[in-house]
Amino acid sequence: MLLRTRIIAGVMASALTTAAIGGFAMMRTSAIDAETKMIATNWLPSVDMIATASEEVQVFRQSVMRHALVRTEADKREVERLAENVAGRLNDFMARYPEMLTGQEEKAIFDTVRPAWEAYAREAKVTFDLSRAGRDEEVLARILGVNAARARDLTAAFQRLKEYNRKGSEGSATEASQMVVSSLIFISVATLLALLGAVVAVVWLVRGVSRPVLEVAGTMRRMAGGELNLAIAGQDRKDEIGEMARALEVFRVKVADGERLSAEQKKGAEAQRQRGERLDGLLKDFGSHIRETLDGTRSAAERLGLTAVDMSRAAEQGTQLTGALSGASDGASANAQTAAAATEELTASIGEITRQVARSAEVARRAVQETERTDRTVRDLAETASRIGEVVRLINNIAGQTNLLALNATIEAARAGEAGRGFAVVASEVKSLAAQTAKATEEIGQQVAGIQGATGQAVEAIQAIGEVVSEINETTSAIAAAVEEQGAATQEIARNVSGTAEAAQAVSRETGVVRDAAATTGVAAGQVRDASAEVSRLSDALRDQVNRFMADVRAA
């Protein structure tokens, strides 16, 4: 099948499906619109007209009863005028409503309304005449009898007509709702089927059109990249893809033949060109290597000449420096010997200082120990004074109790009269003794308090002395350590000074040897400088020969 046939078939199927869905939707929409218009233009207005007419009947009935109640002629004429207006509106309803009839059933119901109204109107007119004649009993009998019966018949007819219209409007609404639901179901199913058909059509078109076109495009890209030895798929197809594949195969064969002929033509020229390029490259490499070698030789010769000059200058400076070094080494040797003697004396002095500092440290350590023992003794004294104070308070309490007992005894002796006089004397003596004891314990307490205060001050002073002695001990220990380090450093200095003296003597001995070697180096440097100048000259001559050779080869 040709591609255009496939595409047209897919598009037509989609269009027909869309048209079918649209046609059904239009039909259903038209039917729903008809039902909606029926409700809006017939059922609802009919119900409204019937309700208005029912209200007019009630007004007309009230007019009949009111006519019997009023007494003046003017009032009766007013009631009759109102009743005539109501009757006119009801007659107008009877004339217009046949236009709203929807069928024979409603027409049959309406045919019962008109006679009922005409009968009620005739009976009302008779009632009005009797009321004007003043026949009230007859009027009342008619209002309660025949008029009431005609009013009930008319009201029942209106009710049947109203009920019919209500059911009709509900039926139209139900029908419209059912059509909406069925339309939605049909459209949903049709849309789903259309989507499935579209998916099938897309898959069909992709497999039959898009994929082969992409394969042909991929083959063309590979051929554009230079890949000509490939098989072109789709040549056996009977559609446009097959025509494209067959044309592409012809193009591939032509391009391959052209590439093969072009390659054969280029092969000979390429071999000749490569031979010339290879020879030219060899000549360039040869000339480049020779020039680099000569440049390196010349640079080395120049560096060798500069080095020879530096060696000659260094030899001269070495000769001068060895002379100065010889004199300096002799002076250094003498100074080192003097420093060694002074260092030995300093070492002896530091040793004596070390011994004295060690002795001071020992004395400070003993002072710390004595201070700690004194502190403990004073603290024990403070505790003893505290216990004495507690005993004094106990004695004072006992004296107070004794004084109370003496007071009680005095009171009892006074009560006993003459018989208790001797007991009163004893109580007086006991009271006096208790007072003396209290006074003595008070003085002892004051003394003990003074001892406790002095002991506390002594403890604080001893603690301060202990802290000072501890600081002296720490300082003495630090001085002893520093002096020991200084002694060790002085001994090391003495050893280094001795070594320096020996090294200075050795330097003095070797200076002569260095002076001779510097002179020999100066002579050798002069010879190297001459040789480097000769090498530079020969390198320049060889460069000129190579340049002439390269020019002759290129000219040939």
Image (tube, rainbow, N blue to C red):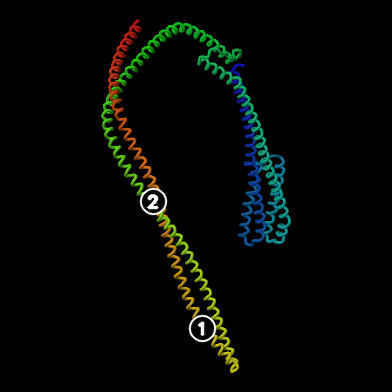
Q: Quadrant of residue 109?
A: top right
Residue 354 is marked as 2
> Where residue 146 sits: x, y (%)?
73, 55
* Residue 229 spot, x, y in % from top left: 55, 12
Instruction: Measure how far apart labels 1 and 2 are at the Cα level.
Output: 70 Å
Q: Position of residue 20 (x, y in %)?
A: 63, 28
Foreground residue among 159 and 402: 402
Q: Position of residue 281 (x, y in %)?
A: 40, 11
51 vs 547, nearest the viewer: 547
At a point 43% along the width and 9% down the height, the residue shown is: 274
Secondary structure state at the residue bearing disc 1: helix
Q: Residue at x 39, y 47 (%)?
A: 485
What amino acid type should be assigned to the residue bearing mark 2? Thr
Q: Is residue 484 above or below residue 393?
A: above
Amino acid at the residue labelled 1: Ala
Q: Is residue 286 above or below residue 31?
A: above
Question: Circle 2: is it few (<14), some (14-19), or many (20+) Cα within 10 Å?
Answer: many
Vertical comparison of 391 with 417: above or below? above
498 is higher (above) or lower (below) than 258: below
The front one of 358 and 526 is 358
| Front in this rendered view, residue 172 or 41 | 172
Q: Secondary structure at mark 2?
A: helix
Q: Earlier in the sequence, mark 1 or mark 2?
A: 2
- Is 363 left or right of 34, judged from the image as shown? left
Quarter of image, res 78: bottom right
Quadrant in which the C terminus appears:
top left
User: Does residue 134 appear to the left or right of 406 in the view shown?
Assistant: right
Q: Which residue is mark 1?
A: 435
- Contact? badges 1 and 2 (CB < 8 Å): no
